[in-house]
Image (cartoon, coloured by chain):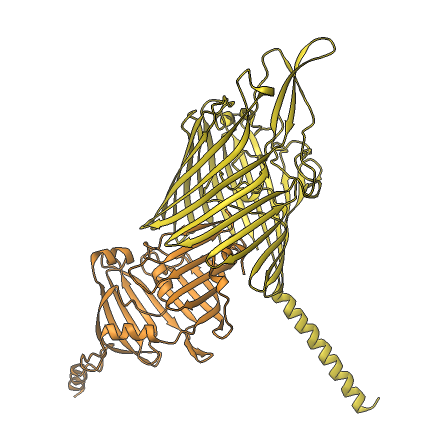
Chain colours: A yellow, B orange
Amino acid sequence: MSFKNQMLIVLILAFTGLNAQEKKKIFKNSFKASLVVASDISYEFNSKNLQKSEIFIKPEFTYKINKNSKVVLKGQLYTELSDNLETGRPKEETVSSFSERLFIGDKTSLELREFYYYTNIRKKLRLTIGKQQIVWGETDGLKLLDIVNPQNFREFILDDFEDSRIPLWSLKAEFDMKNIGVQFVWIPDNTYHITQDFDAPFFTKSLFQSPPEGISTRFNKTIKPKRFIADSDIGLKISTFTKGWDLSLNYFFYYDDLPIFYNDLQFSETGEPFVSISPKFERQHLIGGTFNKVFGSSTFRGEIAYVFDQNFSSTNPKAIRGIETSNVYKSAIGIDYIKGENIISVQLFSDIITDNISAYNLHKFETNSSLKISREMMNDNFKAEALWVHNANHGDGYVRPQLSYWLNSSSQLFLGSTVFYGDKNKLFGQFKDRSRISLGMRWGI
Amino acid sequence: MKNYLIIGLLAFGMLSPTTSNSQAVPSGKSIADKTYAKDDGVSVSRKLTMELKDKRGKIRIRETTAMRKYFDQEKRLAIFYLTPTSVKGTAFLTFDYPDASIDDDQWLYMPALRKTRRISAANRGDYFLGTDLTYEDIKLETRISREDYNYKTIGTEVIDGNKTYVLEGTPKNDKIAKELGYSKVKYWVDAAVWMLRKANSWDSAGNHLKTVIISDFKKVQGIWTYHQIEVNNHKTKHQTIFRFSDIDYKTPLDDAIFTKETLVNGL
């Protein structure tokens, strides 16, 4: 082989080597991976048993295709070692087939939490397409406008919303018109709340009216929307920032994430009366808005929502099929007061059923309040916080203190408790026996 | 003879760590103005690593991308947390208005809640996300406030071979002192590049609170730039070191980066 050819080969090898290295460098800069492992053990005071013993493994991958586009994938492996919260394999009847979890045995599930493509087209239009969470609203703890994604009530509302919110296959388009931001969402994923079975620890019995004593019930198959286009949800959010006010207007045309339970008194072939219950998901319109503004050391924030023609289970014997309809006005106002490392946050939630109906377990005016106090110490190494949620109508609620401590950059310890109180037939009081103490750890790389 | 020499040198202030000559040194106000006049570029993007060390030596490291851009006189700053994983996605945005009488507007995106929280800027003396710098310190970068203090230039001093003007500042009133959390400050401002090189501050009880040392000054794309800030809190014995790298003044930053939508969507 001539010297010239040898040099040529060396140059080609050097070039291809460099090219591969360059590619590797580009890929390294574009691809990011992370992993969070979290565990939580809760001990139930009443039963003196473990209420849950769960482990989350959450890998996340981001690939930046270019300056304006990226693909994000978030997975989750979830194990509940005591198999208590969702006993056995949940049927997931309210979940669309392409959003279902994959169960491995009774205790473990795999879930594609998020998988979306984000792109900013000519710096004019931002599109997020795929499985994602879309969060509206300003409130903490209780939800008004944060209804775009449904929720898994495995732990009622004690789970972090990040974990309990069910991501949906959807499209989010955002663009600006001068200083007005426009967000359009389209959700063809027919997935709704995952509520718990009758025998689950967090079965919300307060939502379901019991039939008269001595009369049996028969459940019919839930009528669930199935059509890809016709049954999809759509939403619009318009937001702006003007004169120190953050403002938004929201509209959502959606299926309520909880079905309505139509009741029919029927007779069996032997002449025995029974109540035939037919759950059905129904369409609703919602208009609403949010606001916030800073006044000195305090942030004043709020949400309003008006829901048209919502159906309620009724206690009125004349109600047709056990259902009455009304519009509902919901509002929430809150103040966050920050002083140094201390935050005091107060929220007042009001629901008004505008029509004169007899909704089951609900008053015409329902008022909930929340108080959250938190203090960070030792340069945010240590945090103490307590949340108190109270329903003024029924006198029930819960208190939730928690301590958290950073062991190092990547590990955090939690110690907390939840104590429910009040009437056992009401929303919070029904979980009186579920009061617990929890110890958790979170580690990430 | 030796004693006479020392007395002579002391008389001329040459042995004092701070030399003073009220005729020769510029006023505190003019020095403060010059720190604002320094070229900062229209925008800058940089990697900011925060190393937080407590009194027992435990270290926590946070990596961020920090971006700043002027919109006419209004300055906007966005910080995106990259690591550790537990705080990844946290993002902070501030609008700093030229009119000092108007409070800044600030937002913090918390990925665990998926919500952007409005934060009061009135508490500018609060510590910034667990570090030893306050929100006000972060905002000022290496400038010294024009509005908050009455300054007295007490002389010059050499730091790392660079001449600095030494200023003492006292808050203009009790309200400002309470807001900032300082009863007195002492600044060392570089006489050539008009950037802060060192600062000491005292708390409201008059105790020495913090020492800030700014170092590793280099020209980046023609602009004098610091690469490290070390803050020692003498009260808590906590230390924060801010390290800046991958500094880029040239690549234009899209206006949309400095919006709440980008806090949510990420970079």
Residue depicted at 28% across the width and 63% down the height: B201
Looking at the image, residue B244 sits to the left or right of residue A445; the answer is: left
Q: Is residue B90 left or right of residue B131?
A: right
Q: For residue B233, what is the image quadrant?
A: bottom left
Q: Which residue lies furthest to the right in this view?
A: A1
Whether A269 is drawn above or below B135: the answer is: above
Image quarter where the N terminus of chain B lies is bottom left
User: Residue shown at 57%/58% (left/top)?
Assistant: A126
Question: In this orientation, does residue A60 appear?
Answer: yes
| Vertical order, A363 against A225 (above or below) | above
Q: Between B208 and A109, which is closer to the camera in this rendering? A: A109
Pick the quarter of the image with the C terminus of chain B.
bottom right
Residue B66 in the image: x percent, y percent?
47, 64
Rendered position, A19 above or below B118 = below
Residue B126: x and y, percent? 34, 55
Q: Position of residue B179 (x, y in %)?
A: 28, 56
Between residue A404 and residue B256, name the one nearer to us: B256
* Image quarter of residue A197: top right
Q: Is residue B55 visible?
A: no
How many tags in the picture?
Answer: 0
Q: Which residue is more in the foreground, A245 or A219?
A: A245
Give the residue at x 31% y 50%.
A296
Q: Return the x and y of residue A348 as percentages of the image width and height.
A: 40, 36
> Which residue is outermost to the top?
A271
- In the displayed structure, would residue B262 be above or below residue A260? below
